[in-house]
Image (tube, rainbow, N blue to C red):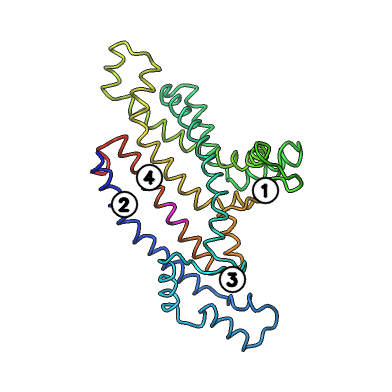
Amino acid sequence: MRGHLGLLVLRRLALGVPLVLIVVVLTFTLIRLAPGDPALMLAGDSPTPEFLAQIRAEYGLDQPIPVQLLTYLNKALHGDLGRSIFFGRPVSELILQSFPVTLLLTSVVMVFASLIGILLGVVAGDRRDSATDTTIGVASLIGFSIPTFWLGQMLVLLFAVSLDWLPAGGLSSSRNDYVGFDHVLDVARHLVLPVTTLTLFELAMIARFTRTAMIEALGKDYVTVAFAKGASRTRVLFRHGLPNAMVTTVTVIGLEFGVLLAGAVVTEIIFGLPGLGRLFFDAILRRDFPLLTGCFIFASTAVILVNIATDLVVAWLDPRVGR
């Protein structure tokens, strides 16, 4: 079993490393080919040609794109992702400062979405074509269809503006300097609305896939045998049906976890969270080439690592996977 998992990791890494390289090359090249000159942003208003030339030389912008790419790749392999043009700080420092916020948001969302989504999927699969199944199906379809940017703004208007129950944005209160458990509670209050916004979409997807997998699992012969031996409905669902349906569910959870790590941009902007998504947006808005490229590299690597971890869990649940 360990040898099988080790080979699986090696195969996934063999595919992941070239994929990251392709992402870096495409991102670097497309950003450099986009209209605009970042040297103008650095130089300020009405710069002299000599000053512009000095800035381009300092940041390597006067070199051909292939030369810039090779220089960047050489530095990136040594852990140097460059220096942000706008912030004037190392890109790796900015990413490591922002990523914990995104990781916290994504982890909380996936925990709640997984628990609720799996439970709803099991109930819907067990009561196929019933009123309960229809209700869960309609609710999940609505949750899956609502745009997160619209839902987030509606939640802010209702719970933060109209009712004044929860903060509208940010990760913590700026007027109070909480410490210890009070700080934890303060952060939790600030995360309620963004977590709710993302959880409704994710749990709807998980519930739908779990329902389909449960229906397939409950139709197997081993379920019929379990009922024939007198096993209770609950035992059959959670000891026989769900473990076999979890392969599909875990795959979906892993994919969505990776997507959220790299793509919770809109939600972080709506709620003013200083995460990786907001850093992405700032880099795009300010044409910060080094920061944007570094964010892409980090996000791509994180998604690949999450997918490898997901493959390992799936292979542990079903040893036939990956052989």
Image quadrant where one finds the N terminus? top left
Q: What residue do we see at 34% from left, 61% from top?
A: 18
Mark 1–mark 2 Cα distance, whole angstroms, equals 37 Å
* Type of the residue with mark 3: Ile
Residue 170 numbered mark, or none = 1
Q: Secondary structure at mark 3?
A: loop
Direction from residue 287 to residue 11 in the image, left or right? left
Identified by mark 1, the residue type is: Gly
Q: Residue furthest top?
A: 230
Q: Secondary structure at mark 4?
A: helix
Residue 158: x and y in percent read 71, 39
Q: Which residue lies under the disc numbered 4?
A: 309
Residue bearing mark 3: 85
Residue 10 inside the magenta-drawn segment? no
Whichever of labels 4 and 1 marks the residue nearer the N terminus, that label is 1
Q: In which quadrant of the rendered image does the C terminus lie?
A: top left
Please name the residue shown 55% across and 37% down the image.
142
Q: Quadrant of residue 288?
A: bottom right
Q: Which residue is mark 2?
A: 12
In front of the other: 35 or 196: 196
Q: Earlier in the sequence, mark 2 or mark 3?
A: 2
Disc 3/disc 4 C-alpha distance (Å): 34 Å
